[in-house]
Amino acid sequence: MLIDVKPRIASEEVRELLEYAVHGDEEELSQAVKQYAADSDFKLLAYEEEEEQYIGIIGYRSEDNGVLELLHLAVHPEDRGMGYGRGIILDAMVLERPAVVLAETDEDSADFFRSIGFQVTGFTKYPGGPEYFRCTYETEENEEDFM
């Protein structure tokens, strides 16, 4: 079950999962914590299997035009490969009912998104920079494939 963890963003459990989502980058972690704390449009939910035992986390912004932009997604390392990431995204989709889900990510995560039905397109943010991937899922077209 997904629960709102913005009120607990300073807790060790929430920060640990968010740290996985930013690949241990302290500056990016600090920026994410400030962003979620300051902006009510940004949601931060954790998948709770037992009381206050979080398996994974998802951070996103749901826009008025039906777009759900995934900002952060992480599953505790010992729980990876068990379908929790897909389940967390699916639960967020059920809550928000978006027409489109978007994510921007690195190559490793792009493979995950591709495996659960997202369309993945590579791009660079600046000439000579690393390749990033835009992952898009149109829920109306693919609803049965994903679920």
Image (cartoon, rainbow, N blue to C red):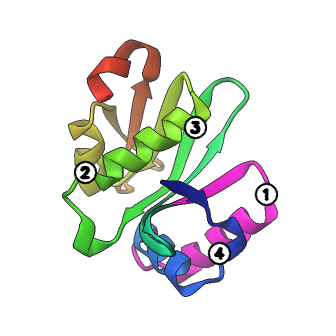
Within-10-Å neighbours for mark 4: few <14, some 14–19, many 20+: some
Q: Secondary structure at mark 2?
A: loop
The residue that mark 1 highlights is: 39
Q: Real-space Cα distance between discs 3 and 4? A: 20 Å
Segment tinted magenta in the rendering:
22-46
Picture coordinates of residue 42 (x, y %)? 69, 52
Which one is nearer the viewer's eye here, 129 or 80?
80
Q: Secondary structure at mark 1?
A: loop
Query: Disc 4 marks which amino acid?
Result: Ile
Q: Nearer the viewer, mark 1 or mark 3?
A: 3
Q: Secondary structure at mark 4?
A: loop
Q: Which residue is the extreme one toward the top? A: 141
The residue that mark 4 highlights is: 9
Q: Real-space Cα distance between discs 1 and 3? A: 19 Å
The residue that mark 2 highlights is: 83
- Name the residue: 53% across, 83% down: 26
Q: Is residue 29 magenta?
A: yes
